Image (cartoon, rainbow, N blue to C red):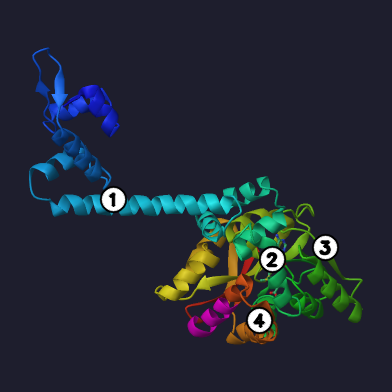
Amino acid sequence: MYRISELGALVGLSRTTLLYYEKLNLICGKRLGNGYRVYSDRDIQQVRLIQQLQSGGLTLAECKSCLESKLDRSVLKSRYDELTQEISRKQTSLALLSSLLGESSSRSWHQILADVAPDAHIDWLKIQGFDEKQALRIKWLSKDMNEHDKYMQDFMNVYETLESWGPNSESDTVRAFQTLSINPRKILEIGCGKGNSTMLLARLCDARIVATDNEQSALDKVEDKIKQNNMGERVSTQCISMTELSFGEEKFDVIWAEASAYVMGIENALEKWKSLISENGALVFSDLVWLTETPSKEAIKHWKSDYPDMQTVDTRKLQIEKAGYNLQNTFTLSEQAWKNYYEPLEQRLNEVGPTLAGSQAVTDIQNEVALFKSHLGEFGYQFFIAEKC
Ligand SMILES: C[S@@+](CC[C@H](N)C(=O)[O-])C[C@H]1O[C@@H](n2cnc3c(N)ncnc32)[C@H](O)[C@@H]1O
């Protein structure tokens, strides 16, 4: 026979807990003539049986009912489901901590933040020591602050030789330009890439053009083209972020942004760039949009992660009007614009892909090309020609 303190030492429970068990009739001590309660080997086993049931996550009340009657499968099943969910939550916590410690990929974390807290995400990345260009590239490209440098190295390896960094075609650019109701004297191009549209605009009118991008290697190519075409008098480049344009009020008749405004968000761009445009001037931009109300699951999944703010044409129209512009014209870029982009891209992937085996950047680009080929039509690039009111 054991006194309560001895029983407690054997099973690792406090006196108070054992008295509570006794109150619930889970154990049953005998009172001796001297008033002490004593417990038998059977009580020790009973407590150990309860402890085993508790290790399955059952509450004391559930243990009691298991001991007193046949197992209730529904109780066990619901504890099982709860525990499964708890483990999954804990695994998510572990994965997040490991990624924040730099020990594993932080992709899913950045993908979620880009969707639910896009601006706070960028600010937080800056606090972590990334500059704006890196923060935006983490958001849009690598989605992983731990593997970012390697990702960008592979990404640029694929893209550096390509002329088009986005879907565009001369005929679409000409069509958008011809819709303008003014003859621009000064154009600001934002996110000009290697300057395909810059040079075309320079041929289409005699405006002064300032072509901007935050990637100097691309601007170097634009500079080469400017020299080759003797356009240095009218066309210049500037390495500057689209979020920090400090040219002064109403300095440009037209802002031209092909496949670039998405970087800072279309609504943000509509608002922030407006003051740079002169009276009756226009903002011309192209943006990836949904072209159907019922896109496929694959397309939704892909763009939810790669462009969470993708909208339908009608939604963009409303945003344009709301921001104080008159939509002059809008049209979907031709299939040729896509081909100009992804055919050389695919060819480049075939060239360098094998040397970059296992690269996340290559996998992402391959997935994007595959999606273009199989689901184009559900989404597309759309030109918007919006006059400032
Ligand atoms: C999809 S590419 C489009 C390039 C070009 N307009 C075209 O259609 O081929 C996007 C361009 O935006 C530039 N870009 C990205 N972030 C930027 C930023 N914060 N400020 C300025 N340009 C940026 C990229 O370097 C790239 O040249």
Name the side, left or right, on which 132 lies relative to 89: right
Q: CA distance from mark 4 to mark 1?
A: 45 Å
Can residue 108 be seen by looking at this rendering? yes
For the residues bearing labels 3 and 2, Cβ distance under 8 angstroms: no
Image quadrant, ligand 1: bottom right
Which badge, 3 or 4, comes first in the chain's sequence?
A: 3
| Amino acid type of the residue that numbered disc 4 sits on in the rendered structure | Gly
Q: Look at the image and tell me in which quarter the C terminus lies.
A: bottom right
Q: Look at the image and tell me in which quarter the N terminus lies.
A: top left
Foreground residue among 372 and 74: 74
Q: CA distance from mark 1 to mark 3?
A: 57 Å
The spot of residue 124 in percent (x, y) is 62, 47
Membership of 239 in magenta stretch: no
Membership of 371 in magenta stretch: yes
For the residues bearing labels 1 and 2, Cβ distance under 8 angstroms: no
Q: CA distance from mark 3 to mark 2?
A: 27 Å
Residue hosting label 1: 82
Which badge, 3 or 2, comes first in the chain's sequence?
A: 2
Residue hosting label 4: 353
* Above or below: residue 34 compared with residue 378: above
What segment is highlighted magenta in the picture?
366-375
Residue hosting label 2: 150
Label 1 residue SS: helix
Q: CA distance from mark 3 to mark 4?
A: 32 Å
